[in-house]
Image (cartoon, helix red, strand yellow):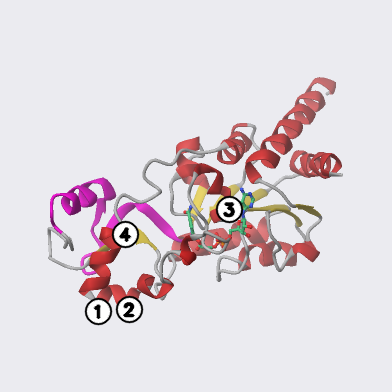
């Protein structure tokens, strides 16, 4: 059963003209970064209220605890076979774009080019000043925190610094959102990997694709609200399933090119 679904997914990838891949926290759990909503996920350890932009702005203690979370799980994480398989899709000319909700930089580390990636929720590689919008490398800011600067401020204007990941209540980066929306609307195959599809407006992307008639592939461990709309629904680990799909699609494309 799983084999035939993988085979069909590989066919869709091979036939696609505009394949969009959409990833959530689940693509990175096999790299050791917990997702938000699974048992043992981030929300079972931290209070989501501490991650609102209002709290960051108004409460110095909240800022201290954000920075005291220490060198986060993101720091030493490495891409897993799912990230590499997505990077491979670009190499074989089959990736129109990658829309990610993740902030961990693992897609870039796996080799997907920056120009192909829309980071809808920002990233944790950098910190940003809420006053002058200057950006700083996260390594530099974390070094300051380790040296005793508990609540680091912008070194130019003394404004509030926060990680450049989008916090609750903060607007999404508008250019990324607009371009990701356009790509989703134009896609003919839309592949969701490791997302509950519960976080908006990101979760609108597969809905836009479906409205335009795209075929939907979902690879996820738990249920999503769009499971019933999927042409192919693969319940399992992204790091096991995705490399098989990409390898089969490659074989099929190779065979096709030899037959021409
Ligand atoms: P989520 O936590 O709501 O859902 C993750 C989904 O992935 C779940 O349905 C789970 O069953 C599935 N999953 C977990 N491991 C999997 C695996 N190995 N293979 C396939 N599926 C797997 O995550 P979300 O939908 O991305 O939304 C939550 C928010 O979490 C996003 O805004 C994102 O910015 C943020 N987030 C990002 C990271 C990261 O950057 N790595 C980590 C945690 C949370």
Q: Residues within 10 Å of mark 2 (few under 14, many from 20)?
A: some
**What residue did someone put label 3 on?**
26
Residue positioned 28% across, 50% down in the render: 138
Instruction: State which tag comes first along the sequence, 3 or 1.
Output: 3
Magenta segment, which residues? 120-149
Q: Distance between the residues labelled 1 and 2?
A: 6 Å
Residue positioned 25% across, 68% down in the render: 63
The numbered mark at residue 122 is none
Instruction: State which tag comes first along the sequence, 4 or 1.
Output: 1
Q: How far apart are marks 3 and 1 (CA)?
A: 32 Å
Determine the secondary structure under disc 2: helix
Which one is nearer the viewer's eye here, 245 or 241?
241
**What residue did someone put label 1 on?**
58
Q: Does the residue labelled 3 lie within 8 Å of ligand 1?
A: yes
**What residue did someone put label 2 on?**
54
Q: Is residue 223 left or right of residue 76?
A: right
Q: Distance between the residues labelled 4 and 1?
A: 16 Å
Between disc 2 and disc 3, the foreground one is: 3
Q: How crowded is mark 3: few (under 14 residues within 10 Å), some or many (20 or more)?
A: many
Badge 4 vs badge 1, beta-carbon distance below 8 Å = no
> Is residue 260 rendered magenta in the image?
no
Instruction: State which tag comes first along the sequence, 2 or 3.
Output: 3
Determine the secondary structure under disc 1: helix
Q: How far apart are marks 4 and 2 (CA)?
A: 14 Å
Instruction: State which tag comes first along the sequence, 4 or 2.
Output: 2
Determine the secondary structure under disc 4: strand
Determine the secondary structure under disc 3: helix
């Amino acid at each position: 059963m799983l084999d035939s679904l993988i085979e069909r997914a590989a066919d869709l990838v091979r036939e696609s003209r505009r394949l969009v891949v959409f990833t959530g926290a689940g693509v990175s759990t096999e790299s050791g970064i917990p997702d938000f909503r699974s048992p043992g996920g981030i929300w079972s350890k931290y209070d989501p209220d501490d991650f609102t932009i209002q709290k960051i702005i108004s409460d110095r203690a909240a800022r201290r605890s954000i920075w005291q979370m220490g060198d986060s799980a993101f720091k030493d994480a490495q891409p897993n076979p799912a990230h590499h398989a997505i990077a491979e899709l670009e190499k074989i000319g089959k990736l129109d774009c990658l829309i990610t909700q993740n902030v961990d930089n693992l897609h870039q580390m796996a080799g997907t080019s920056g120009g192909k990636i829309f980071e809808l929720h920002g990233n944790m590689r950098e910190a940003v000043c809420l006053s002058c919008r200057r950006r700083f490398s996260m390594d530099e800011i974390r070094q300051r925190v380790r040296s005793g600067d508990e609540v680091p401020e912008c070194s130019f204007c003394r404004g509030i610094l926060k990680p450049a990941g989008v916090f609750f209540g903060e607007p999404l980066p508008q250019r990324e959102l607009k371009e990701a929306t356009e790509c989703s609307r134009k896609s003919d195959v839309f592949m969701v990997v490791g997302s509950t599809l519960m976080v908006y407006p990101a979760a609108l992307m597969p809905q836009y694709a479906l409205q335009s008639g795209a075929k939907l592939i979902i690879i996820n461990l738990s249920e999503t609200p769009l499971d019933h709309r999927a042409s192919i629904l693969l319940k399992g680990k992204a790091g096991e399933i995705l490399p098989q799909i990409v390898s089969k699609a490659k074989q099929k494309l190779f065979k096709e090119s030899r037959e021409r």
